[in-house]
Amino acid sequence: MGDRLREVCIRFTRSTADLLQEALRVPALRYLEVHCPFDAPLECPRLPGRSPSLRWLRAGVYPLLTALALIRQCAATLEELELVAASTDPYGCPDLGEALRGCELRGLRKLTLLRATVDDTPCRHDELTCREQRLRLLFALKGVSACEVRCNECGTRTFDELLRNVFSAAAREGNRAS
Ligand SMILES: [Zn+2]
């Protein structure tokens, strides 16, 4: 076994702050999935001085501010982010776009909103609020990162496709009203 460990992937379905902190100490950690149950909110871990070099993160934790703190810590290297979040009033974070913009995710290529928790409890989600949320996210992240924003329920849309959808929906509403 001469191979050196290059990339580590860790998955917690019921994490605690201590477990998460231990994981973040692993230098080769590149892929991290972390969840916690709604009735056992996760505290923001006391992170080590060195930022973890995560490339991929899937987070379904309460409160969402803990996930944001984690995202901020690994913003420099993060390429893909999957976030369990409702399309209306995501837990503890009234403006997800602003919050993510503040994380400075310059290398982010893909943001996926997951509409169910790890134990398959659905998050509040409907097509209209989802579209609005994704548009707001695209606006907020514009100029910071050139990432696509998708929802695991509704699929991928580019910025232009989303705008076109909004306008055609508005036109249909207009036709119906007249
Ligand atoms: Zn959706």
Image (cartoon, rainbow, N blue to C red):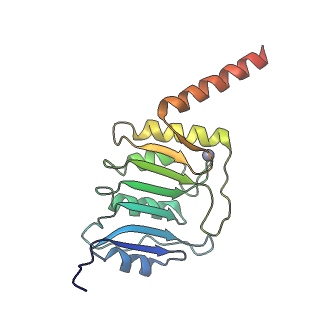
* Residue 162 drawn above or below residue 91: above
Q: Residue at x 60, y 29 (%)?
A: 165
**Relative to 169, does residue 59 appear above or below in the rendering?**
below
Q: Residue 52, position in %: x, y?
A: 30, 67
Q: Is residue 72 toward the left or the right of residue 172 in the image?
A: left
Front residue of 104 and 53: 53
Give coordinates of residue 162: x percent, y percent: 55, 32
Task: Please give the name of the residue rendered at 36% of the width and 40% of the height, measured from the top-left corner.
Answer: 146
Left/right placement of residue 153 relative to residue 4 reads right
Residue 15 drawn above or below residue 93? below
Image quarter for residue 121? bottom right
| Residue ranking furthest to the bottom | 1
| Percent position of residue 75, x then y | 33, 56
Where residue 14 sits, quadrant-wise, is bottom right
**The C terminus is located in which quarter?**
top right
In the current view of this chain or complex, which residue is farthest to the front? 1
At x 39%, y 61%, the residue is 56
Q: Residue at x 51, y 57 (%)?
A: 83
Rendering coords of residue 84 (x, y %)? 55, 58
Number of numbered markers: 0
